[in-house]
Image: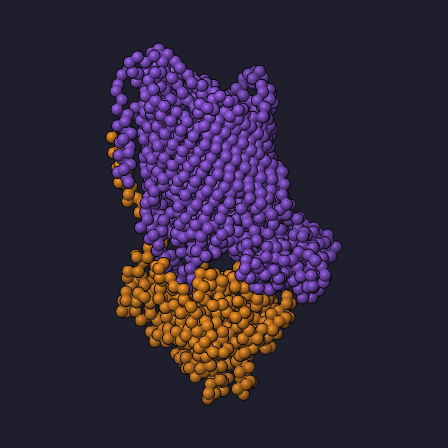
Chain colours: A orange, B purple
Amino acid sequence: MITLGTVALLGTSCQKQIDIKPQNSVESDLALKTSKDVQGVLIGAYTAAAARGLYGGRFQVTSDFLGDDGDFGYFGTFFGYTELNNKTITVDNSFTEGVWNAGYNTIGVCNTVLAHLDLVDAANKARVEGEAKFLRGMTYFDLARLFGKAWNDGSPASNLAVPLVLTPTTAIVDIQKPTRNTVAEIYAQAITDLKVAETNLGIKSTYASSAAASAVLARIYLTQEKYDLADAEATKIISSGEYALVEHFVDEFQVKEQATRVFNTSEDIFAIQISNQSGFNALNEAYASSTYAGREETYLFNQFFDSYEDGDDRVNEQTDDSFTSKFNNAFGNVVVIRLAEIYLIRAEARIKKASPDLAGAADDINVTRHRALLDNTTATTAEDLFDAVKYERRAELKFEGFRLFDLKRYKESTYSVDGDGNHVDEFVWNSPKLVFPIPKRERDANPSLTQNEGYQ
Amino acid sequence: MKKILLSFLLLFTSITFAFSQNSVVTGKVTDQKDGSALPGVTVTVKGFPTIGTQTDINGNYKITLPTGAKALMFNYIGYTPLEVAISGSVMNAQITADAKQLTEVVVVGYGTQSRRSLTGSISKIKGGDIENLPVPSLESAIQGKSPGVYIQAQNGKLGQGIQVRIRGASSVSAGNQPLYVVDGLPITVDDFSSNGASTNPLVDLNQNDIESIEILKDASAAAIYGSRASNGVVLVTTKKGKAGDTKITYNQYYGFSKPTKEREFLNSEQYVTLLREAGAAGGYSTTSVEARLKRYAAGSDNYKTYDVNTDWQKAITQKAPVQNYNLVLSGGSDKTKFYISGTYNNQKGFLIGNAINQYSLRTNVSNQATKWLEVGANLSVSRTKNYRLSNDDQFSTPEQIVALSPITPLIDPRTGLTSGALDLDPNAKGAPNSNFPVYYNPLLNAQNSYFNTIDFRNLGNVFAQVKFTSALSFRSEVGVDILNSSEDSYAGALTARNSGTGNGLGFNSSVTSTNFNTNNFLQYIQAFGKSTINAVGGMTFQRQQNDLNSISGDQFPSDAYKKLISSADITNASSASTAYSLLSYFARLNYNFSEKYLVSLSGRIDGSSRFGVNNRYGFFPAGSVGWVISQEDFMKQQSLVSELKLRASYGITGNSEIGNFPSRGLFTAFGYAGVAGARPTQLPNPDLKWETTAQTDIGLDFGFFNNRLSGQVDVYLKKTKDLLLNVQVPATSGYTTITQNLGKLQNKGLEIQLDSKNIVGKGVTWTTSVNFSINRNKITDLKGQIITGGGDAVNRAVEGQPLGVFYTVEFAGADPANGDALYYKNTDLGDGKRDRATTNDYNAATPVVVGNPNPKFIAGLTNTVTYKGFDFSFLLQQVNGDDIYNGGGQYMSVGFNNGADNQTIDQLNAWKSPGDITQVPQARLFGGNGVSASSRFLSDGSYVRLKNIALGYTFPKSIVSKLKLRSLRIYAQATNLKTWTKYTGWDPELNSDAFSGNITQNYDFYAAPQAKTITFGLNVGF
C-alpha cells in the first residue's frame, strides 16, 4: 500500500510538471499587454523589413539583376540570382519568393501593431501608427511594382498586383486565401498609409520619419506621372533643411575600416540599421569582393566604366576594377532612401510637369554633379535635361535598387548579356519577363492567386 | 484513468493474499550450462495443478506446499522439464536446455520475457555480434543485422548523425528516429551541433559494454512506450557481472581506414580542352578564357602543356589509424555482482582534420541487500572529443575541394605556400588570395582552423527491487542522462575568404542537457495450474531540459590567440533554455495457457507538455495473441517441425518528436542595431496532438529439424494519421508554415529472418543467417499540398507517393540540333497521359515523380564458420532499388554551365556538333544550359556491400594455461571492404549532412564516402 501511495503521490505532484512554458520566446497572450509591448512589436516590424529577403538587400538586388543590361555579370552559385541576371526567372525562384514572403511578413507585423494601437499611450500613439503605416505603405508599393505590371503599362485599374491584407492573422481559422488586388488599389493603399505617416511623424529620425514618407510618396507620384505632387513631396524634404549631401560621394558608403556600428549620415533619409550584432547586409553579400566579406560573385563589365562621363568621381566607387565598393562594410546600414535621389526626383518632376521649371531642374541636377566633381550640366532643353537626369540617376544610384523601375518609367529596353557583357537578347520595358512571377509556393498554398503573364 | 489503474494494481495484490499459508520451500533455479540464474521458471507441485509460482529475476522462488505434496516440477520453455522429490525447505534446481526447445530471454519494455512466450515482433542483437567493430556508433554496428531496420549513415565524417528507420518513416515533419532506451532510461538523442552538420549523441555509448539490443517493432512490443513509439523502440541493455571468479578481459585493436571510393574528375588536359570549348560556346573571347586558365594555373602558362595535374581528392585524404583499448573486470558473489569496464578509443578519419577521441568508463553493480530487497546502479561516464569538419554545403568542407581545377598547383610557386594562402597584389597587404584558386581552398581550413566538440556524458540509473511475495514485486528506477556538449572553434586569418573576416573568427558554445527519468512499477508473476499470468503496471515521469549558450567574436591580434578572451569584437552571445516533460501510466498483462495460447494486453497514458491544452493526454493500447502450434499434441508425433508459433498484434502508438512548443502562439525577440523588438513567429494551435499510428502485425516463428533451420516471417501494416505537418500557408497571412495535425501515411511490409545451423560438428560449425525486408511507404493524404525538402527541393512529400520522392522536371538529353538541354513537357493531358514532347524551356516542363529514395528491399547475409580454434564470419548487406540525386551535379556535372568547377568525367560526352546524340548538353561557360534541377542528376543507388568480415583464432586451453591466461584470441577484421554498385558518385550510402531530413533523403551534396576500415586485434582473458 505504501508503494501504491508513493505512485499516486508522484502522480499528483507531476501533474503541474507537464505544463512547461517556453523561455526562448513568449506566448502570444503575454506578448501584447502594454504600450511598451506594442512599441516593441513596432521595432519587430523594422526587423521584419530588415530581413535579407526584403530591404536588407534582396529587394534591391533582385530588381537590379533583372534590370541590368551589362554593367555587371553574376558568376556565382546562387542559381536564383543567375536566373534574374539572365531574365529567365522560374516560378520557384527562391529570391523572388523570398521578397514576397518577407514583404508579407513585414505587412503582417505592421498589421499586428496597427490592431493594437489602443494599447499605446497617447504620447506615442500617432508616432507608432505613422511608423507602422510607413513600413506597410512602402512595402505594398514595392511589392506592387515587382509582382505587378508597371503603372504606365496598360490599365492600373485592371492590372493585377498583390493581395491587400490589412488585418493581422492571429489564429489558424483566420488564415485567408485572398485574391490579387489591382495595381491601382495597392498604390492607393500605399498612398493612404504614407500620408498618415507623413502627418504623424517628425521630419527626421533613425526610424521612419515624415521625410521618409514624403520620399516614398514622391517615388509613387513620379511613377504615376503626377509630377506636381512628386515635386511638392521632394520639396518638403529638401526645404526642411534637415538633410544635406555628404561632402564626398565615397563618404556616403561606409567602408570596412569604419566601426561595426555606423549611424545614418546627414544624407540618409531612411536606412535599415545594421550592426555586427543584428541584421544582415545582403547588398554586401551580393556585390562585395571577398576581401570585404562579400561572395565575390558580381563582376563589373566594361560598360560600367564606359557609362560614366570623364571625371565623374562615382566611377571610383569600386574595388580592383571588378566590384562595386558601395557595400564594402558588411555591418554597414542598408540605405533605402537618401537625399541625392530626392533631388533627382524633383529634377525629373520639374522637367515633366505641366508647367516645367527647367532652371530648377538644372539646379537639382547640378547638386549631385558637383558632389561627383563634375561641372554644371550643359543641358538646357527639356529633352536634354531629361537625358541629364537619366544619366544622374544611373551614375548616382547604381546598385541601389532603382534601375528596373527607371527603365519601365522611361520605357527603355534592357538586355541579357553574355559572359563578356555583350548584349544578347532584348527585353522591352513591358516584357512579361521583367515582372516577377507569383511564387509557386504561394500559389500551391493559395490557389485563388492567378499567375502573371509569361509564367503560366 | 489513474483511478482505474490503481484498482487494477490493487486487484493483483489481493490475488496474492488469497492463498492460504502452509509449509514453505524456497530455492534458486539455475542453468545447468553456466550456472546463471533463470527468471520466469514455472514451479508447480506435482499433483496440485492449481498451485504454482515463477522464479524472480534472480532465479529465486518461494512456494507454499499443500499437505501431501511429494515433488516439485520445474518447467521452463526451451528446457527439459525437471521433477524433484521434496527433500527440505531449500531446494535449488539446475535445469538443462533442451536443444529442441532452445530459447532465449528477450528484454521488453519494463521487464523480460522468454522468446517462446513472445507475441510481439522484437529483433534481438547480441552484444557479442557487435563487439570490436571499428565503427563510430552502435547503429552502424547493427546495420544489416535485423530485418525491417534500415540504417543509413550520412557520410564518412566521424561521429555524424545516422538515420535509422524501423519499418519505414512514419512521419513527414516530426521525428522518424526510434526511441533509444538504455537500461530503462530513455536517453538524450538531440543533435546539438552548431555547424550545420548533425552529430550523433549515441557515439557516447561504448558498444563493447552492450549485452544486447532489442528492437521493438510492432505495436504490441512498442505501445508500452506510448506517444514516442511509432518509430519503434531500441532497448539497449548493458553487461552485468555474474557470480563467480572475477574475470579480467583485455581487448585491443589497431587498424586504419580509407575512403571506400573516389569520384572521377577531369584531368588537366581534359579540363583545359573542355573549358576552352565551353568558353567559346558561352560567347567568351579566347583572350578571356586563356586569362581565366592562367589565373587558375597560378599565373603560369604551364596549363598549356598540362604540367600540373593536381589530384585534389588525394590532398584531402590523410592516414587514418584506428585504435581501441578496452579492459573489463566482472564477477561477484551470490549477493553482489559487478561489471567494470574502461575504454580508450582513438580514431582518425581519412578526411584531413577529422578525428574522434574517446574515454569511457562503466560500472554496473547490483546487491541483494536482504531477501526481499535488491539494489543496484548502472553508471557510465565518457568524454568524447570530435575534431569536426564543416558541413557539406560549405566551401571549407574537404570534399568541395573537387571543384578546384586540376591545373591549379597544391603549392603556389609564386609564394611557396598552399594555393590561396597569400595574395601577391601589394594592395592585398598580405591577405589571403580572394580570387585564386577558383574557390576557397578547403586545405586552408585544415591548416588554419579547428572546430572541436567535447561531450561529457554521464548516463546512470539506480534501482531498487522489493519482493513482497514470491509473485509480487516492485521496482523503482531513477536515472539521469547528463550530456554536456561544448563546441570550440577558431578560424585563422588565412581562412578569410571563407570566414569573411581577416583577423580570426572564434566560436564557443555549451549545452547542458539534463534528462531525468523515473520508472516505478509493480510486477506480478503467478502460475495457476496451466495458466501463467505476468503483469506489470506503474508510472513513469521524464523531464528533459537543455540549457544552451554560445558566443562568437572576431578581431584577434594574431592566430596565436585563439580563445574568445582575445577577441576585440564579440559579435554574438546568447543563452537559451528549453524543456519538455512526459508523465505516463502504463500496464501490461501477459497470459500464457499451457505454453500454447498466449495473450498480451498493454496500455499507456501519456501526458506531454508538447501538446495543445485541448489534447494533453493520449491513450495507447495494444493487444496480441500467439498460438504455439508446436506445443499441440498433434504436433508431438512428428520431428520435422520443432517450433511453430503464429502471432498477431494490433495497437496504437504515437509520435511526439516535433520540438517542445509547437502548439503555442509565440512572439520572438529580435534586436535592431541595439534596440529590442519582438514579432510574432508562430500561430497558436491548442488542438495540436501526437501523431497516431495503428499497426497490425502477423508473424510466424518456425523451427525445423530440431531447430537447425529456424526463422521468423512478419507482415505488417502501419497506418499513421494526424500527421504533424508544417503546413504551407499563404505568406499573405504573415506566416509561411504552421504545425497542424493533418494528413495520413502508411507503411506496409514483409520481414523474413532465417537462421540455419548448416554444420554442427565437434570440429566444425557453420551457421548462416539471412534477413530480408520490404517496406512500402505511401503518403495517403496531405490535403493536396506538396512539401519540399532542403537542398534543391527535389525531394518532396506528395500525396499517393512514398515520402521523399524525387519530384522534378524530366530530362530528355541534349538537343541533337544545338546542344540545348531538353526536358519532357509532361503536361498533364487529362486522360492519365502526359505530353512527351520535349522543350528547351525549363519553365515549360511540368515536374513529375522521377525517382524514389526508398529502397525496394534491404537484406543481410551473415555466415559464421568455426574450425577448431578458428572463427570466420562475414556480413553482406544489400540495399536495392533506391535512387540517388546528386545535388552537387548542378556544379560538377554540367559542362561548366554553372562556373569553372572541375567537372566529372562524363562531361567529356558533351554535345559538340549538330547531329550528336548524347545525354550531356553542350558545355557553355556560365551558360546555364541544363543546370536546373532535373532527372539528369538522378541515378540508381543500389548496392551490395561486404559490410564486415572477420577472421579470428582462439588459442587452445593447453597453450593458454601455460601462459597463465584464461583465454587468448587474435583477430583481424574489415568493414566496408568491398562495395558493388553502379552509382558513379563517391559512395551509395549517403545523406548530405547539410540537407538531410525526413524528406530530403539520398541527396548527395559533396558527401564524403564511407570509411573502409581494417583492424587487427587481441583479446586476453585473465
Residue toward you, B781 or B197: B781
State whether residue B156 appears in this view: no
Residue drawn at (50%, 49%) of the image: B802
Q: Is residue B680 left or right of residue A335?
A: left
Picture coordinates of residue B9, whole percent (x, y): 28, 32
Q: Dividing the picture into quarters, in which one does residue B864 lie? A: top right
State whether residue B794 appears in this view: yes
Q: Quadrant of the N terminus of chain B?
A: top left
For this orientation, the residue located farthest to the bottom is A355
Q: Dividing the picture into quarters, in which one does residue B221 lie? A: top left
Picture coordinates of residue B891, whole percent (x, y): 60, 56
Residue toward you, B557 or B212: B212
For this orientation, the residue located farthest to the right is B305
Instruction: Determine whether B863 is above or below A25 in the image.
Output: above
For this orientation, the residue located farthest to the top is B87
Residue toward you, A250 or B338: B338
Residue drawn at (47%, 74%) of the image: A159
Counting the numbered discs, the total is 0
Picture coordinates of residue B892, whole percent (x, y): 62, 54
Residue drawn at (47%, 65%) of the image: A99
Q: Is residue B417 left or right of residue B383?
A: right
Picture coordinates of residue B74, whole percent (x, y): 39, 18
Residue toward you, B15 or A173: B15
Residue drawn at (30%, 18%) of the image: B64
Instruction: Determine whether B315 is above or below A334 in the image.
Output: above
Instruction: Determine whether B393 is above or below B974 in the image.
Output: below
